[in-house]
Structure formats: structure tokens, C-alpha cells
Image: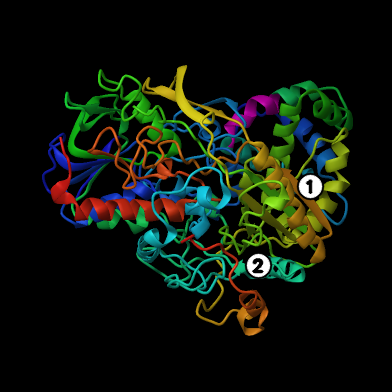
Amino acid sequence: MNSLLTSEHRMIFAGIADFLIPNTEGMPSASEVGVQGPILDRVLSLRPDLSEAFFRGLAKSIGHSAADATNALNSGDHEAFGAISLVASAAYYMVPRVRELIGYPGQENRPDPDPDATPPYVANGMLQHVIDRGPIYKPTPK
Amino acid sequence: MSDTISNTPRFKRGEIVDVLIIGAGPSGSVAAKHLAQSGFSVVALEQGHFPDRSKYPGRNPEWELVTQKQWHPNPNYRDLPRDYPINTSESDVNPLMFSGVGGSATLYAAHWTPFLPSDFRVRTLDGVADDWPFTYEDLLPHLEAVEHEVGVSGLAGDPTYPLRSPPPTPALPIGKVGAKAAECLDKMGWHWWPGTNAIPSVAYNGLNACVRRGTCMSGCPEGAKSTTDITYWPHAIKAGARLVTGARVREITVNDSGLATGATYVDENGRERHQRAHSVIVCANGIGTPRLLLLSTSNRFPNGLANTSGMVGKRLMMHPFSAIMAVFEEDLESWRGPYGHNVESFQFYETDKSRGFVRGAKWGVMPSGGLLGATSFVGSKVFTSEKPSAGDMWGKNLHEMVERRFGHTMVWGIIGEDLPEESNRVLLDDTLVDSDGIPAPKLIYKVSENSERMLKFHEERVLEACKAGGAIETAIVHQMRDTGWHLLGTCRMGTDPGNSVLNEWGQAHDVPNLYVFDGSSFPTSGGVNPTATIMSVAMRQTQRMISERRNLKVA
């Protein structure tokens, strides 16, 4: 757990994250998948370089609505906006349920079965058109 | 800590060896392996370490997040202990590199694109720049030999090149991204070919077969992407080469006769040591090599070692680069690898002066990464834009954008040839130093008018092809700062010692037992990824050294 994160931080972050990533278009909101929970600690531990701007942005947001806070950061503190939005989106898109809804299995080990098989672009004649146009290089001058 | 990796039972630190190699990247690895196998005693000094494949982040859900920082290709941004800082305040482009055994290839995309015949004859054909002191045909046997060591995958018969022997492993699948790109190019009647990559499709020389994970540019967790820590160093060490890691060279030393005698280096404990050698080969990349020569001053070489011509550090070439994102209705599974190029096109590579510029560019079509978009590819938020309201790119629009783009996007990388200009150069910074107190390099570099015109032309052509193939959205990323992957030309080969640093064998005109085998030696840059040519040149120069061993001038 990140010792700097208070419950207030998590609440403010959840509000901004929900403004950035709402429940709409069939997708859950950021807080519905728990971006303000342990995954937030994980993201900040992976990217400590974002911490200063992240916490500065949250501090500036105290007492403001999520919409007002987010727009104020977007126009007045790009670094803080960038840090919070990156943390929110990175956390959100690391959640298995979100990936499943989008249809993203992650970067998988899934090779094509037979490297020696004739590629489709050869079998269907597509590459032959390129070959038939002939060489396209300038040869070494004599 | 500094490690000495050696197969010989009693290594006496500092004993004189036949050859000292500085840098264990692609060119240094080729030299080490073949020299050791030919009976030379070899020590290589590398400031980084052996990469730890278990630490590559590609298998983890946080892959994209850490690729933006800890695995970023810009050493100034990555800022790891073995990185050295570079002053880029007067450079339009940030240089990208990685220190370690295998060099910057640890993070490369493994596009394997040898120079074309015209790349060696730019002066003769186009009236600009220079000719190389050898031809495509001279280099070809060395290229083919290297390809069999590297484990290149590809398909023979590409009309981009004269007829030549095939790569040793079959081409990787072009995937749905490649098939769609090929369709786009077909509609225009333009050249395309399945990508040739330094990523084998079957197990080869210690490499595993590619599994299409697509996290190539943050290190291959499968050990499939070809890097020399896997393909060369085990052989070199078995043949008796000694590799000292964590060893940061600060100076190449010379004797009163002006011959190189070895190098002084700082180990990771901060202790200064000296390695003696009869010959020295520098392979520290297009910035590290001139930096080291400029650091190595003496009474005989007050302006830097081997720098009587004044050319050390000058003619820095970094390929102009633009990327185009193209989104299609079809599901392209565009997170799947490899992040080599799936399809390549050389349609507009050769010069046509009617276009308003000279030389040309190669196109490589690649997938587009994970859900955070292509940010991990070019190192910044590429496909967002400056919008007045956060809601424009976020909220409902975020979900719509992800649904429209994710899995449906390909990235076209345009790599253009950079022409050499003496004003583009590497020098020593006045105040910036690395963690060992060694003066850091400074770059002075401007993107030229020729490059700007070339990129605009190529961007327009790529857009035409994408639209012909039915793209529903396109975006251009024009010449960003973080595109300096290819660092070339700063210790060029030439026949005239008055305006070059090296002869055609990579031997310094001024210092007959000093050699440079890396991309610094290039007279021109080509418009292609240079690793194939860097390694081929290193092979050629190494074979020459071996065949001339009785005639070598040594300290």
C-alpha cells in the first residue's frame, strides 16, 4: 500500500477518474472497477515519477466538483492532469473485467501454427503482382 | 558490480591482449566473436550489463505503463544507473540508445533492412553527400554471413534488392495488420513485401521462435528477438573472449609514437583501471564513439584522438521519421506482434528529383500496441491532441475512441535518409558530466529542409494508400523529438584523410591500431534501419583484420 494515499486522496481520485472514464457505452466507470483501490497503489509504485504531479493535482482539486477540478487541471496544470489521467487510464485498462469487455486478451504468447506453411499472400497470387512489376532499385553504377 | 565473464580459468586483470573492444552492442559483438574464434585474445569493456530477460515487462499487464519510463529508449528520460546524460538543448531530435550487452538492440524493433545498392553511391547517382569506399556487392557476402548468425526471417525475391540468397528462417506472419496494409498498397499498384526482421520464425542459434507477443521494443520475454547477448556472446566467450561489464571507459590511451595502448575505465565501484591492448576497436555508437575520441586528448592529439581532420563528431545523421496511424473498420487484432515490421514498402525509396528533394524513405507497417495506444512506440502521447476541454478526449469520447481504434489500427513508420552536414555534430559538453564525472556529449542538430520536404511527400503518399484501402481515420505524427534511434556518420570512412576519420577498413587514418566498426563510420545514412548494415560492415572489417593479422600495426 502507498503510505501517502489517504481515503480522501482515493475519493478525489475516484471522482476525477469517473469524470474521465464514466459508465457509458456499455463500459463501467473507473470507480466501479476499483481504480481507487489496490491497483492505484500498484500503478504509483510502478511509476513513482508520476507521484509529485499526481498528488499536486489531487490537492488542487479539494473542494471542487470532479468536472471543475478536471477542467481546471487540464487548462492550468498539464503535468498534473497528465499524471492523473495516465494513472486512471493505466489502472482502468489493467483491470481484467475491462479487458474482457473490450476483447483484449493482453499481449499473448500465441504464435501462428506453422512457419513453413505457404503464406496466404503467396497462395492467392497477391505477392506475384509485386514481383511481376520487376526490380525497383537503382543498380550500382558501373 | 563489474563482472568479468570469461571461459578462461585464470584471467589476469590488465594483462595485455591482442584486441580491446569498447562496447558490446551489435558491431562489438561481431568483432569479439570472430576475432576470438580466430585465435585473437580479446577483452571487451561494456558500461552496461547482461540484460535480464526475466525483467522485460512484456508479459505483465503494466507493460505499456513502464515502457513509458523505465523502458523508454531516451536515456535522458529513462535515467537508469548505466545511462549517461546527453545535452540536447540545441538538437531538434533526441538520441535514443541503451547501454548493455547487446547494446541498443535490446530495445530495437528488429527491422532488418540492408542498405540498397544506391545507398553506397549517393554522390555518383544524386550529386550530394558522398560515395562509400566500397559497394553493395562488396558488402553482400558479409551481410549474408551475418544474417545466418542473427537468425533473420524473411522471404526471398524482394524486387527491392538484386537477386541474393534467402534469409535463414521463413518470414514471420504478416497478420491482419500486414494483410490490410498490403491491400492498401495493392490498390495503388505500389511495392510491398512481407517484413524482413531480426526475429526468427523458428528456434535458431539460441533464440526461440517468435510467438507474436508484440512487446519487442521493451525486450523480448521469449528470447526470440535477435540480440547479440544471445546470438554472439556465448560463442565469443566460449572461444576465449573476456567480457567486462559495468566498465565505463573514460579514455583511450596512446604512447609517444601515437599508437593506442589500451583504455582507462571506471568500474562500478568507482575504481579506475587500465586495460592494455595491441589494437583497440571502438563500438560505442554514433554518439559514444566520437565522445570517447574527443575525451582522449594528448600532446599528439590535442583535439581528440584520431582527429587531425577535425571530423570526429561531425556529420551526425539521425533519420527523419514520421508515423501515420490508420484506423479501419475491420478487426485487425492490432495488438499482436511482431513489432518488427509486418509489411515494408520501398515504393518511393530511390531519388526522383521532380519531387523537390533527394533520396527517399522506407515504410514499415507495424501494429499499434495495447490500450494505452501507440504511446509506448514513440514515447509520448501520440494520438491525443491539445484540446480545450478534457471532455473532448475523455468521458464518453474515450470509450468511443477506444472502440473505434483499439484492435483496428496500424502504424506506418516512415524512415527517411538524412544527408550529412558538418554543422550537425557531437561535441563534449562544457559542464554536464555522467555519474563518474566524465564529460557528457552535447548534440547540435537541425532537421534539414530536404528532410522536411521528404517527410511531407511520404506522409501524403501513405495517406493516399490508407484511404484507398478504406481507412476511416488517419493521423500524422510529424518528426517528433524522440525519434533518434539511428546514430550515424560521426567518424566517417573516406579515402581522403583531410576530411575523414577512417579508411575503408574502419582503421583510423591517424592511428593505425585504432579502429571504429560501428555506425559512426557511415559516410551516408541510407533511409532504412541501419543494424543490418552496421553488423555487415563490422563483419567486413573484422574479417579484414583477421586476414591481415600478420601485417597489423600494433603498440
Image position of B138 with respect to B71: above or below: below
Q: Please identify the residue farthest to the top as the structure is shown.
A: B431
> In this rendering, which labeled residue sits more in front, label 2 or label 1?
2
What range is drawn magenta here?
A47-55
Pinpoint residue A37: horizontal percent, then vertical percent.
69, 40
Image position of B173 with respect to B409: above or below: below
Q: Which residue is mark 2?
A: B191
Q: Secondary structure beneath disc 1? A: helix
What's the amino acid at mark 1?
Glu
**Front-most of A83 and B467?**
B467
Q: Is residue B11 left or right of residue A111?
A: left
Specify the subunit that label 2 lies on. B
Quadrant, the N terminus of chain B: top left
Image quadrant assignment for residue B451: top right
Which residue is depicted at the point 62% across and 52% down?
B360
Badge 1 density bin: few <14, some 14–19, many ≥20, Cα 10 Å? some
